[in-house]
Image (cartoon, rainbow, N blue to C red):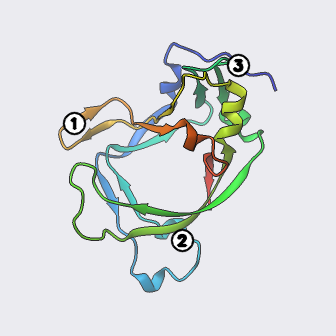
Amino acid sequence: MELSIAPTDGRERNACRSIDPAGFFIRHPPAPHLLGNFITHEDHLFQTIHMGAAVVDEDKWLLIIDGLVERPFALTFTQLCQFPRRSVTAFHECYGSPLMPPTDAVWRIGNVVWTGVPLRFLLDLARPSPTATFVWSEGLDYGTFHDITADRYQKDLPLTKALNHEVLVAYEMN
């Protein structure tokens, strides 16, 4: 597959159709006796959404890998799904608000199966610079949380962790 050149005009932001729900949203897990299966069904998995959830148009969605890499590129959702896929069963836990860390156990937990492309595979294609130390990911969600407004969600991951085989660019759950 030929890789597309990574766009620099921000068009990847056009994939966000809307934010729904908008703003903070929480769905608590059901009572423990309803969590008898090893894998937590999506309907029973907790949700903690701080700025709203992006409703994404798959036809406009792009994964862009750029920055301190030798070969920046962009992939459509269809192209991403054509790469080797892997599944990882993981314990999924919410620790609570980053602004007000809890003093008691939150107990928002579940077991999920993530499926996607190993991030290492994509980084190997991009060839990170020896000076790169972090991978920054950016979501389409945006909004306000505790009077802090952000035009996107960003999160960093140490490159050494990103290269582990269990780290995925996931596109399926369960």
Instruction: Looking at the picture, tell me which residue is in the foreground, 143 or 162.
Output: 162
Q: In this figure, which residue is indicated by the disc labeled 3? A: 4
Give the amino acid at mark 1.
Answer: Ile
Q: In this figure, which residue is indicated by the disc labeled 1? A: 148
Q: Position of residue 124 (x, y in %)?
A: 71, 31
Which SS class for mark 1? Answer: strand
Residue ID at (47%, 66%)? 45
Give the amino acid at mark 3.
Answer: Ser
Drawn side of residue 31 relative to residue 90, left or right: left
Mark sitting earlier along the chain (3/1): 3
Q: Position of residue 148 (x, y in %)?
A: 22, 36
Give the amino acid at mark 2.
Answer: Thr
Q: CA distance from mark 3 to mark 1?
A: 35 Å
Q: Position of residue 140 (x, y in %)?
A: 45, 34
Q: For the view shown, which residue lies furthest in the front direction? A: 130
Is 165 placed above or below 18 here?
below
Image quadrant occupied by the N terminus:
top right
Q: CA distance from mark 2 to mark 3?
A: 37 Å
Which SS class for mark 3? Answer: loop
Q: CA distance from mark 2 to mark 1?
A: 32 Å
Residue ID at (48%, 62%)? 92
Q: How many residues crowd around disc 3 within 10 Å: few (fewer than 14), some, or many (20 or more)? A: few
CB within 8 Å, label 2 to label 1: no
Numbered label attached to residue 68 = none
Numbered label attached to residue 40 = 2
Image quadrant occupied by the C terminus:
bottom right
Mark sitting earlier along the chain (2/1): 2
Drawn side of residue 94 relative to residue 120, left or right: left
Q: For the view shown, which residue lies furthest in the right direction? A: 1
Residue ID at (72%, 28%)? 125
